[in-house]
Amino acid sequence: MQKGKIVWYLIAATSALSLLLLGSGAILAYQDTRTESVQPQKIAGEKQKPTGDSPAAGGSESVKSASIPTFSPAQVEGDYRLVALGDSLTRGTGDETGQGFVGNLTAELQKLTKHQVVATNLGINGMKAPELLPYIQSPEVQQEIKTAHLITLSIGGNDLVRGAGAISDPNPELSKQTQDTYLSTLDQIFTEIRKQNQTAPVLFVGLYNPFALDGDSLQTAYKILEEWNFQTSRLLAKHQPALLVPTQDLFAWNGEKRLSVDRFHPNAEGYKEIALRMAQSLR
């Protein structure tokens, strides 16, 4: 893992500059094309999802994340347990290799220990925050959270895309209403996580922009996205150890080459960059 780190303000400044240079905007995060419950993919070091009911459901080398203390795999005797919660980004939708950021992060963590890194991928396509809350209250998922050394979470993209008006004409008032509801639910989600596990760091995947806009829509969408990530980061400060891992800049420079054919989700390269960014945030 790289040891250097740059504070959030530098990352935000870099992201803003990249968007200006690119000339295409930030809109509201990625969008899931469907809502469904799926079986988790089997990848190296990954175990199957519990059998509870499911609801309907730039490069990292140039910009480094802030970091949080964590249980290094090297410090754990026996298996190191990673639990991944969230939507299709956690699921790895769009990755032609099937690894997603969970598989890639597992591989990075595996480099640090002679023991096995066991990843449980609980990502569900189309998941929104109000659906995730009851999902993590199931006994099976609670047990997974309780035994985790590290938790990852991606949620909010579907809430924002479906609650901020048309993609080509985002509505700040609708976005604010959606954001307030989302933040309240996210607070409850973290409360539930901390009931089961008070010490495992949570890495939250920040929202990014897969869309290109111009004019007033560009400016409005950029402000909405920045505010969404900022308020999420503020909420995470209440539930430490937790960190929002920024991804916006990863899809600003040459962003199209990191998107899958659906133009919403990352491809294999995009997921690998997200995983490397997440790995950088651990020390």
Image (spheres, rainbow, N blue to C red):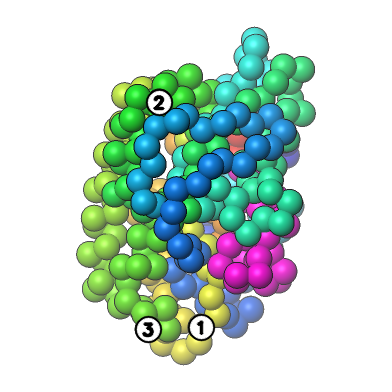
Label drawn at residue 153: none
Pointer 1 and pointer 3: residues touching (CB < 8 Å)?
no
Q: CA distance from mark 3 to mark 2?
A: 41 Å
**Observer-nearest residue: 98 or 199?**
98
* Residue shown at the point (29%, 39%) measured from the top left: 134
Image quadrant where residue 190 sits: top left
Check disc 1: other Cα within 10 Å, few if <14, some if 14-19, many if 20+: many
Check disc 3: other Cα within 10 Å, few if <14, some if 14-19, many if 20+: some
Label drawn at residue 140: 2
Q: Amino acid at mark 1?
A: Leu
Query: Which secondary structure lies at badge 2?
Result: helix
Q: Is residue 61 above or below residue 241?
A: below
Residue 69 appearing in the image? no
Q: Position of residue 35 (x, y in %)?
A: 42, 58
* Residue shown at the point (60%, 71%) measured from the top left: 263
Main secondary structure of the magenta stretch? helix
Q: Amino acid at mark 2?
A: Glu
In this view, the mark in front (3 or 2):
2
In the visual, does 45 lie left or right of 171?
Answer: right
Q: In the rendered structure, which disc, 3 or 2, sits on the residue that comes first in sequence?
A: 2
Q: CA distance from mark 1 to mark 2?
A: 42 Å
Residue 30 appearing in the image? yes
Segment tinted magenta in the rendering? 251-280
Q: Position of residue 73 (x, y in %)?
A: 65, 21
Q: CA distance from mark 1 to mark 3?
A: 9 Å
In the visual, does 121 lie left or right of 130?
Answer: right
Query: Which secondary structure lies at badge 3?
Result: strand
* Residue shown at the point (32%, 71%) measured from the top left: 164
Q: Check disc 1 and report the residue beneath it.
A: 213
